[in-house]
Image: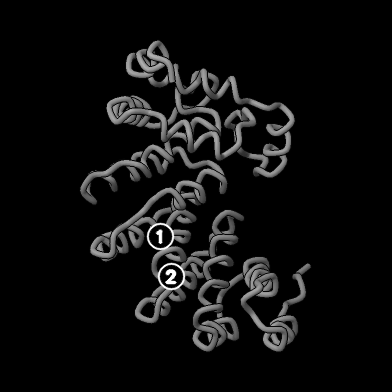
Amino acid sequence: MTSSNAAEMEKNPIEWIQTRLREAADPGYANFTRRMLPREVESPVLGVRVGVLRQIAKDLSESARELTLRTALKGGPRRGKKQRFPNALEERLVVAFLIGRVKAPFDKRIELVDAFLPYIDSWAVCDEFCSALKWRDGEKEELLNYVTLCLARSEPYVIRFALVELLKWFVDKERVSFIIASVEELARRKITERAVQMGCAWTLCEAFIKFPETTMRYLRKNSLDDFAYNQTLQKILDSLRVDEETKEEIRAMKRKRSR
């Protein structure tokens, strides 16, 4: 990085980020990405690959990172054409990766997480954000408390965030029953947004792979609707960590779609 570029980054890091994004934008890749996203996503898509976005976040100095996060997360997202940074999908992902690089006490990092949750408007932002977050073993109980609060909320992508954090950090012997009970509670609440249902399916699949007997008992008696239930079974069938004999049993459990 030249001295002039470094000076510009320190002076106006958001403008520096946006310039980097424009330089790396690929219209063809933008069209491909847009087809993968839910139709209701309003954020523009620039067509910048994730590896480039991570590098942009890495290249920012600590002071530029702090200024970017302070500016970007102030006031929350706005609706309509006047949405400020971060607006585009890739801008939101850069902010997500910046949060993941913050070295601070748990409370400070969870404040940043909480401020970013309203910006999650697709599975792509949600899942990449979760991948960027790293937690220490001593922070897991506090994290679980926070995730539990998120599960009780109504925003679909906040719930999906909680589900992805559960499957990343808490699919263990002590908590698998809690995870299954949490998915069942979501089913009883009749939350039918696809982002949540697919999050439930992904989480149950991971639980099944690690604790098949416990999860199988749930799959044989649950409140999941047909879509979430069949998607769970399909994810298990798609897994390379499940043997063929078990897959035959899973295939026989599929429900016929209600008309």
Q: Residue 122 at what x, y percent from top left?
A: 56, 44
Residue 199 to residue 9: above or below: below
The part of the image, by quadrant, that contains residue 10 is: top left
Q: Residue 166 at what x, y percent from top left?
A: 42, 64
Q: Residue 119 at what x, y percent from top left?
A: 45, 37
Q: Which mark is residue 73?
A: none
Q: Residue at x 43, y 72 (%)?
A: 171
The residue at which mark 2 appears reads as 182
On screen, residue 51 versus residue 256, left or right, reads left
Say whether marks 1 and 2 touch (CB < 8 Å).
yes
**Furthest-top residue in this view:** 4
The part of the image, by quadrant, that contains residue 165 is: bottom left
- Mark 1 Cα shell of 10 Å, populated few (<14), some (14-19), many (≥20): many
Q: Residue at x 67, y 86 (%)?
A: 246
Helix, strand or loop status at disc 1: helix
Q: Amino acid at mark 1?
A: Leu
Q: Residue at x 62, y 67 (%)?
A: 228
In-front residue for pair 155/67: 67
Q: Amino acid at mark 2?
A: Ser
Query: Which comes sooner in the sequence, label 1 or label 2?
Result: 1
The residue at which mark 1 appears reads as 151
